[in-house]
Amino acid sequence: MEQAPGATVTTIHVHPVKGQPGQELSTVEVGPDGLHGDRPKKAAVMVLSADDTTGARANLVVTMPPAQLSAAVGRVLRVGTVELEVTGPAGSCPGVYAAVRRPGTVSVGDAAVVGEASADEADEAHVSRGTGEPA
């Protein structure tokens, strides 16, 4: 596992209604489809570096440098008791999209750690959002 020195979650947001301001939380439950209270979007979770907060509507903001966060594509990001598979860049926004590999709880101040996915874990991560069918 690889961690930026002291990389942590600084902000948690859910965006229940499209076009409306998000809600800032100190702790959130994360299920197979994303953060509890968030509306369905292109990806279960959007993660953004605290160094690059250009107005993107991220769910999780972490103190990881933008380059390290971008380099996490195809790897696992562990925050709190949650494991996310970083699936790709967040389109025209800074940050990355992620799928939920292991649901759990995330709180502000939790460590943000990047690790490798094993072959078995990578196969699991390619199953679509809780349907049991291949993506």
Image (cartoon, rainbow, N blue to C red):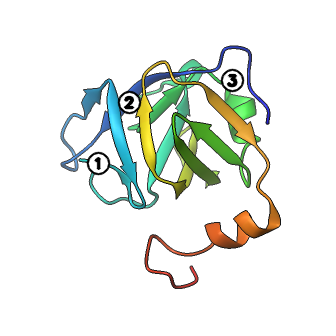
Query: Residue shown at 56%/79% (left/top)?
Result: 135
Q: Mark 3 points at which residue?
A: 65
Q: Which of marks 1 and 2 is in front?
A: 1
| Front label number (2 vs 3) | 2
| Residue that carries the numbered disc 2 in the rendered image | 12
User: Across the whole image, how many numbered discs are drawn on residues?
Assistant: 3
Return the residue nearer the eye: 18 or 99: 99
Q: Please, what is the three-letter code of the amino acid marked with disc 1?
A: His
Other residues around mark 2 within 10 Å, as few (<14) / some (14–19) / many (≥20)? many
Nearest-to-viewer mark from 3 and 1: 1
Circle 1 residue: 36
The secondary element bearing badge 3 is classed as loop
What residue appears at the point 26 percent right and 43 percent down from the top-left corner?
15
Q: Residue at x 58, y 83 (%)?
A: 134
- Above/below status of 22 relative to 121: above
In the structure shown, which secondary structural element does the residue marked by tag 1 occupy? loop
Pick the front one: 134 or 47:
134
Viewer-nearest residue: 32 or 66: 32
Which amino acid type corresponds to the residue marked 2 in the rendered image?
Answer: Ile
Mark 2 or mark 3, which has the lower sequence index?
A: 2
Locate residue 68, reporting x and y percent: 74, 32
Circle 1: is it few (<14), some (14-19), or many (20+) Cα within 10 Å? some
